[in-house]
Image: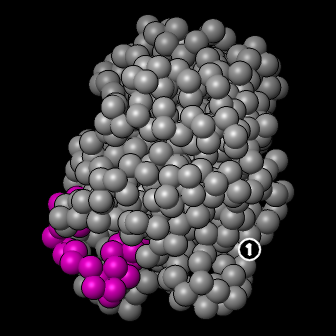
Amino acid sequence: MNYEQATNYLFTRLPMFSRMGVAAYKKDLSNTLQLCQFLGNPQTKFKSIHIAGTNGKGSTSHMLAAVLQTAGYKTGLYTSPHLKDFRERFRINGAFIDKDFVGGFVERIQPAIDTIEPSFFEITVAMAFDYFAQQQVDVAVIETGLGGRLDSTNIVTPELSVITNIGWDHMNVLGDTLQAIAFEKAGIIKPRVPVIIGQTEEETKAIFEQVATENQSPICFADQTRYVADWQYAHHQLKIQVSETGSDERVEYQLDLAGFYQTKNAITVLEVVHQLQKAGWHISISQVQQAFKQVKKLTGLHGRWEVIHDHPVVVLDVGHNEDGFRQMLMQIELTDHKDLHIVIGLVKDKDFERVLSLLPKEAIYYFTRAQIPRALPEDQLAAHGHAVGLEGHTFPDVNTALQAALQKAGKQDLVLVCGSVFVVGEVQL
């Protein structure tokens, strides 16, 4: 089976969350365990770092992978979903998975697929683990898909568990309180494996501490060990000075990820590096500085306040829930511009009314949709937007909407494309 045949089979044969939503979500780990048993349990054959969280887990995963490979470790990186190319999900030192491996893997595992009937995500997790084991990576950074406790990736026993933060997202699956969501994320905490929480939140701190205690897992909160003492944002570049709590000494880092929200992810990564250093990993501060300057180049990360055009400035951002939109709004305030144009498409199973109520009423809106069944139709999105005072027109696809925004925007304006990974992934410019 060649690559094209294999990916066509995966996309058409298997239940896929990005298309179907919750109907494709399997609420236990049995399928993944059976798939990996069929493959000889590859998840036991490499070291890993497991990362969950409502927002920031993708950026944190890429930043950490950049640090590890800069430090000389052969580093696997598994993330989801992809923006443009299926192979984005599986990287080693930034390079895509080999097409021949994908074809061979799908052909090899077809008998198990017929018996187990797994989801698309479960197959991609098994593929990642098999690939990393075969390629003998030194370490793999594994991003959860949805939640943590019942996420397909949660069959690894990592060197460290990382939970970036807790916010409102996927409430129909994870629970309708922050405590319930935190409990699901805390499910990645393993017995006696250290866990790092990126952001301390009063509503959820006790839950993490309780689960860590039950598992005899050392726990630390990254934002209590370090803080950003100073920062500069200019020309879509972010410089930060970081101090350890109780110290006046500062270390400067330049980030090629321009969003101010990346400061929180950087603090989390720095604590991960600190814990790895304590465990005997060889990573220097200068290597971290070098990695932070070129995360996009080293790992291929896209869609995080990504500037793709100047005059007018066009920015892509995959933020898609309440917390993500709040971070984007903060970044808009930091970005010099005259008028604001927002190209937006959302999915049906998000709390889109809460998101829309946050958005600035003075912006010009271009309501659109990604070409997936989960997408909220653009006319319904516009109706909900108009109900809270957002004015604009509807467009059948993202690129038509973006072209309309570019025709209307002046050279000093800002055009933001946002709402979901799938909207950003369809942009062609």
- What secondary structure is the magenta-colored segment mainly? helix
Note whether residue 25 is visible.
Answer: yes
Camera-nearest residue between 237 and 297: 297
**Where does residue 313 sit, x and y in percent of width and height?**
36, 27
Relative placement, left or right, of 428 versus 359 is: left
Q: Dot 1 lies on which element?
A: helix
Relative placement, left or right, of 407 versus 74 is: right
Residue 419, compared with residue 382, is above or below; it is below
- Where, by quadrant of the figure, is residue 370 drawn? top right
Residue 112, compared with residue 242, is above or below; it is above
Residue under label 1: 203
Packing grade of label 1 (10 A; few <14, some 14-19, many >=20) is: few
Camera-nearest residue between 287 and 30: 30
Q: Residue at x 68, y 51 (%)?
A: 31
- Where, by quadrant of the figure, is residue 24 drawn? top right
- Where, by quadrant of the figure, is residue 383 drawn? top right
**Where does residue 66 sit, x and y in percent of width and height?**
28, 57
Q: Residue at x 69, y 88 (%)?
A: 214
Relative placement, left or right, of 186 versus 303 is: right
**Where does residue 188 sit, x and y in percent of width and height?**
61, 69
Residue type (three-letter) at the residue carrying disc 1: Glu
Q: Residue at x 73, y 30 (%)?
A: 20
Quarter holding the C terminus? top left
**Where does residue 352 sit, x and y in percent of width and height?**
75, 36
Q: Which residues are magenta?
A: 268-291
Q: Is residue 270 magenta?
A: yes
Quarter holding the N terminus? top left
Note whether residue 260 is visible.
Answer: no
